Amino acid sequence: KIIESKRVSNDYINPKQAVVAQRVKTLDLKNDVRCMRIVADSIWVASRDGSVHIRHVQTGSLGAMISDEKIYRSEHVYNEASNDERKKFFVNAIMHKNNRVFLGSSDGFLRTYRIDMDRTGTLQNTVQVGRQLLHGGGIQCVTADNEHHWTAGQDSQIVEDGQRKMIAGNNMWI
């Protein structure tokens, strides 16, 4: 359910007068949010039930769901899947870099998805293209620059580009 209001200070105004107003949207979700990231014209929302909901930024409509490494194109199909069939892990971190989205999860895996967009930047398709165990505990955060990406986990390790390295006493990578 999306609630939209136009507001200038504390006074509500006619939407036709909203040229100078700030648009506020609220989206009611079924589960608590662990983390989220804007990717093109969509927002990827990781929920406490272990699923990732891919929603259109402007409308809030559900485009797809990712759960137990499967991509569901409708909520109905997802709800039909047995809870016993689902793998139990949670996404703790989401990173977008180029045409990839990386999901860092509670089981220590970094899952990689290729996203396909049209010329206008609208998300067209999502396909899982990788899965790599990087940590002995959950991945807590991910970050990147133009050339590299890093993950940090509950195992007190920082991993660069999927290659385990150790931090020496003088804070140099070895």
Image: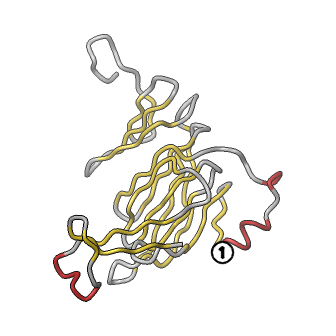
Q: Quadrant of the N terminus?
A: bottom right
Query: Which residue does the image show at 52% across and 51% down from the upper left?
Result: 33
As drawn, which residue projects farthest toward the bottom?
Answer: 16
Classify residue 121 by image quadrant.
bottom left
Q: Quadrant of the C terminus?
A: top left
As drawn, which residue projects farthest toward the top?
Answer: 169
As drawn, which residue projects farthest toward the front?
Answer: 11
Q: Nearer the viewer, residue 80 or 28?
A: 28
As drawn, is 78 to the left or to the right of 144? right
Classify residue 56 by image quadrant.
bottom left
Query: Which residue does the image show at 73% across and 48% down from the upper left?
Result: 87
Q: Which residue is denoted by mark 1 in the rendering?
A: 74
In the depicted structure, whether residue 73 falls above or below residue 151? below
Q: Position of residue 39 (x, y in %)?
A: 39, 65
Query: Which residue does the image show at 28% across and 18% down from the upper left?
Result: 171
In the depicted structure, whether residue 35 falls above or below residue 25? above
In the depicted structure, whether residue 102 falls above or below residue 24? above
Q: Nearer the viewer, residue 73 or 145?
A: 73
> Regarding mark 1 in the picture, which secondary structure is present there?
loop
Q: Residues within 10 Å of mark 1 (few under 14, many from 20)?
A: few
As drawn, is 76 to the left or to the right of 132? right
Q: Position of residue 143 (x, y in %)?
A: 35, 44
Query: Which residue does the image show at 51% across and 47% down from the upper left?
Result: 34
Q: Position of residue 153 (x, y in %)?
A: 48, 31
Q: Amino acid at mark 1?
A: Ser
Q: Position of residue 120 (x, y in %)?
A: 32, 83
As drawn, which residue projects farthest toward the left?
Answer: 20
As drawn, is 18 to the left or to the right of 144? left
As drawn, is 24 to the left or to the right of 94? left
Q: Nearer the viewer, residue 62 or 146?
A: 62
Look at the image and name its color scheme.
secondary structure
